[in-house]
């Protein structure tokens, strides 16, 4: 049991005058006690006994709320922004962030994760820049944009997962006559809370307008189980710029096929999962971000599970029912939902259900602060 919270104050201060801590074990509020608390306030001091419930909960009490954003509500607004708002130097990106209702109006999907829908119109260019925050793109629909990462043009198509690790210059250009939208994921809130971020402008145009089928990064690194002998043994982020849908799809299909044939490999019955990895370490794609793809057979359900750290999920295809903590939603293609730290998640597939997921798990694993609990697991 955590100690009870003696004060109502959620680090926001008391509304009227100095709060004198009351409750079990606390002395009666005398004039001397009031003067003591006034002294604390004057000297910018806060006694532990008024805050301990807030500081030391028995288990994580996330400010991040479980929340669902429906794709059919996001898309028209992104299209409207495409008509009304230019993209270029200064604003840099026509990216519209999910603002978690628990986070006081900040453009943060969770306390550590940024998630946005980005819209790039026909022939438009998003200028080059770099930042220390790690980023990725996930494409739910469309194609025709190349993201140019440190001068290497990388094609974006439905189902692809693309990396822009921290401090790599990057810009995007749409070579087609149709607009394109995608999901951006970054560790912006984490860097913001840690006061660790740097940013720099690059070229106003993308530095290479060519449109190769495969990026140089893929040609060098994206061959299963093979690495170039000339390259460093271990890199902090994956050098693979794009993880292509055909590979992800095949890996998930094979897991389920193997299960059907009586062999191990799935997470649980009817639930296949793959994690995108850094081939130089076997670990996560970037130091702060984990990314995975999950496929549930029609009718399959996951065991209720909770873990330290927050996640954002996007439905890639199919329909299902998702429960996060006390919220339950039916979900379909493109829908995005947030799973706050230590809230229980359960997914049921109404049809075959494909989901993309990203989380801040590597942060907690690196700090030895990760925990997971699966209900009903042996
Ligand atoms: C950024 O550079 C991108 O490169 C997307 O597409 C979203 C949000 C905040 C700051 C930089 C991108 C971003 C961003």
Image (cartoon, rainbow, N blue to C red):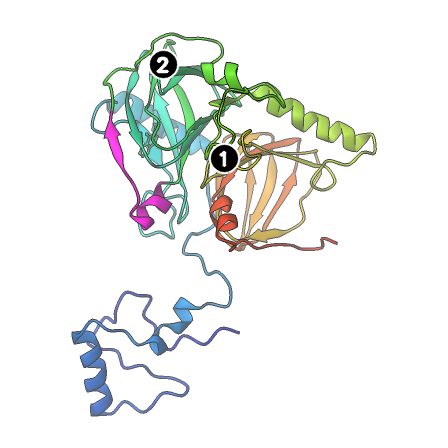
Helix, strand or loop at disc 1? loop
For marks 1 and 2, give the CA distance: 24 Å
Residue 89: give x, y in percent of width and height: 21, 24
Return the residue at label 2.
174
The residue at the far left in this view is 42
Residue placed farthest to the front in the image? 230
Please name whichever residue, 301 or 275, is drawn nearer the observer in this view of the structure.
Answer: 275
Q: Quadrant of ligand 1?
A: top left
Q: Is residue 366 left or right of residue 264?
A: left
Is the residue marked by circle 1 packed among few (<14), some (14-19), or many (20+) residues within 10 Å? many
Q: Is 62 or 221 nearer to us in this picture?
A: 221
Tag nearer the camera, 1 or 2: 2
In the depicted structure, whether residue 146 falls above or below residue 369 = above
Work out whether mark 1 precedes mark 2 in sequence or the reverse, and give the earlier one: 2
The answer to whether 12 is drawn above or below residue 277 in the figure is: below
Q: Judge whether residue 252 is colored magenta.
A: no
Q: Which mark is residue 189?
A: none
Q: Secondary structure at mark 2?
A: strand
Q: Residue at x 38, y 53 (%)?
A: 102
Q: Position of residue 136 (x, y in %)?
A: 43, 30
* Residue drawn at (36%, 14%) of the image: 174
Q: Residues in magenta?
A: 188-201
Does residue 59 lie above or below 239 as drawn? below
Instruction: Point out the residue furthest to the right here.
Output: 262
In this view, the residue in front, 324 or 169, is 169
- The residue at which mark 1 appears reads as 335
Place of residue 207 in the rendered image (x, y in percent of width and height, measured from the top left): 30, 14
Residue 189 among magenta residues: yes
Q: Is residue 177 left or right of residue 315?
A: left
> Residue at horizontal 49%, vertical 50%?
364
Image quadrant in which you'd find residue 252: top right
Is mark 1 in CB contact (under 8 Å) with mark 2?
Answer: no
């Amino acid at each position: 049991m955590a100690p009870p919270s003696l004060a109502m104050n959620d680090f926001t201060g008391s509304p009227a005058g100095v709060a004198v801590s009351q409750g079990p074990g606390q002395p009666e509020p005398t004039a001397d006690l009031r003067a003591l608390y006034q002294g604390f306030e004057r000297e910018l001091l806060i006694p532990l006994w008024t805050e301990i419930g807030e500081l030391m909960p028995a288990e994580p009490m996330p400010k991040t709320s479980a929340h669902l954003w429906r794709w059919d509500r996001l898309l028209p607004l992104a299209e409207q922004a495409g008509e009304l708002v230019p993209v270029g130097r200064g604003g840099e990106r026509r990216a519209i962030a999910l603002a978690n209702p628990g986070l006081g109006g900040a453009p943060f999907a969770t306390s550590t994760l940024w998630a946005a829908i980005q819209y790039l119109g026909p022939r438009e260019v998003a200028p080059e820049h770099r930042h220390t925050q790690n980023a990725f793109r996930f494409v739910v629909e469309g194609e025709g944009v190349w993201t140019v990462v440190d001068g290497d043009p990388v094609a974006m198509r439905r189902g692809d997962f693309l990396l822009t690790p921290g401090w790599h210059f990057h810009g995007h250009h749409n070579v087609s006559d149709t607009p394109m939208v995608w999901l951006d994921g970054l560790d912006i809130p984490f860097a913001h809370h840690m006061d660790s971020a740097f940013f720099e402008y690059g070229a106003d145009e993308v530095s290479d307008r060519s449109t190769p089928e495969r990026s140089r990064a893929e040609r060098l690194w994206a061959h299963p189980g093979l690495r170039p002998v000339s390259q460093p043994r271990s890199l902090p982020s994956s050098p693979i710029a794009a993880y292509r849908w055909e590979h992800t799809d095949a890996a998930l299909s094979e897991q389920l096929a193997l299960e059907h044939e009586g062999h191990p490999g799935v997470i649980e019955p009817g639930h296949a999962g793959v994690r995108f990895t850094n081939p130089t370490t076997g670990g996560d794609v970037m130091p702060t971000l984990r990314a995975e793809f999950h496929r549930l057979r029609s009718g399959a359900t996951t065991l209720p599970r909770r873990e330290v750290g927050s996640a954002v999920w996007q439905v890639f295809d199919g329909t299902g029912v998702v429960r996060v903590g006390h919220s339950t939603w039916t979900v379909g293609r493109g829908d995005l939902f947030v799973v706050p730290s230590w809230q229980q998640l359960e997914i049921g597939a109404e049809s075959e259900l494909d989901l993309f997921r990203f989380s801040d798990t590597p942060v907690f694993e690196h700090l030895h602060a990760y925990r997971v609990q699966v209900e009903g697991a042996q």
